[in-house]
Amino acid sequence: MMRLIKLIQNIKKVEPLHTFLIIRSEGKSALISNPRGQERSIGARIMWGILWYVIPMIASLGGIFGGNQEIQGVIKSFENLAGVAIPLFMGAFFSLLLAIPSSVDKLQKMGLDEGTFSRGKKAYKQLASIMQFQILLCFAILLLWLLRITMLCILRWGEYIYGLLSIILLFRFIVTIIYLIIRYHYLVKIEIK
């Protein structure tokens, strides 16, 4: 057992997995903190937990094992989403991510007081972490799509596994977009002042 734990720890240190795990950790941390970098209130954390864990699990398990044709239709149209929309989102997130350093410079040149500038800079850092996490989610969705085409169709429960994971990832993708909108809202309020 100790060898297995040591093997897992060594695998976590290998690039690019090590960087992916850091991005995942920073992204989730930015999602569950407020724009000032502080931990959210209990109510906000409960809401995030419901949006991040509970609703995707209920929807995926209910749709897969309940035989709901609408949800199974969503699963079947997942290939279209993965093939068209996900690469578009990845490109948009990359371009927004590249614009963040110039936005921070612009924020600094606005002559804001130190507290407001610090909040804006922290919000941009959180925004960058969330966008990197969003890009990893897009990557996971594309990887799932490729696995379904190549390997999951062989497994007896492959369609169920694919359906379960695709709904969970799509819900998390949507939740991450919601939190990106919240961060932009706070940044716009700072920049318009």
Image (spheres, rainbow, N blue to C red):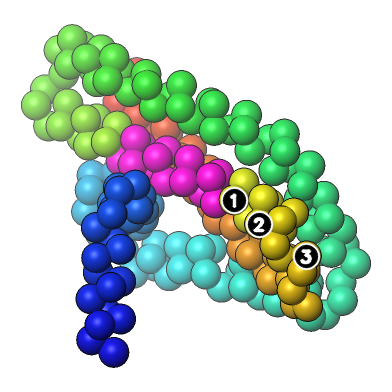
Q: Examine the rendered structure and indicate whether residue 16 appears above or below residue 116.
A: below
Rate crowding at label 1 as few (under 14), some (14 to 19) or many (20 or more) other CA atoms within 10 Å: few
Residue 5 lies in quadrant: bottom left
Q: Examine the rendered structure and indicate whether residue 188 appears above or below residue 181.
A: above
Rate crowding at label 3 as few (under 14), some (14 to 19) or many (20 or more) other CA atoms within 10 Å: few
Disc 1/disc 2 C-alpha distance (Å): 6 Å
Q: Are marks 1 and 3 in contact (CB under 8 Å)?
A: no
Instruction: Give percent across and percent down for residue 135.
Output: 48, 40
Q: Which residue is mark 3?
A: 153
Q: Is residue 36 left or right of residue 176?
A: left
Identity of the residue drawn at 66% across and 57% down: 147
Q: Which residue is mark 2?
A: 147
Q: Which residue is mark 1?
A: 143
**The magenta stretch spans residue 130:** yes
**The magenta stretch spans residue 155:** no
**Residue 189 visible somewhere in the drawing:** no
Residue placed most toward the observer, 72 or 162: 162
Q: Secondary structure at mark 1?
A: helix
Q: Which stretch did the figure color magenta? A: 126-141
Instruction: Give percent across and percent down for residue 109.
Output: 18, 10
**Residue 37 visible somewhere in the drawing:** yes
Of tags 1 and 3, the one toward the viewer is 3
Instruction: Give percent across and percent down for residue 82.
Output: 69, 43
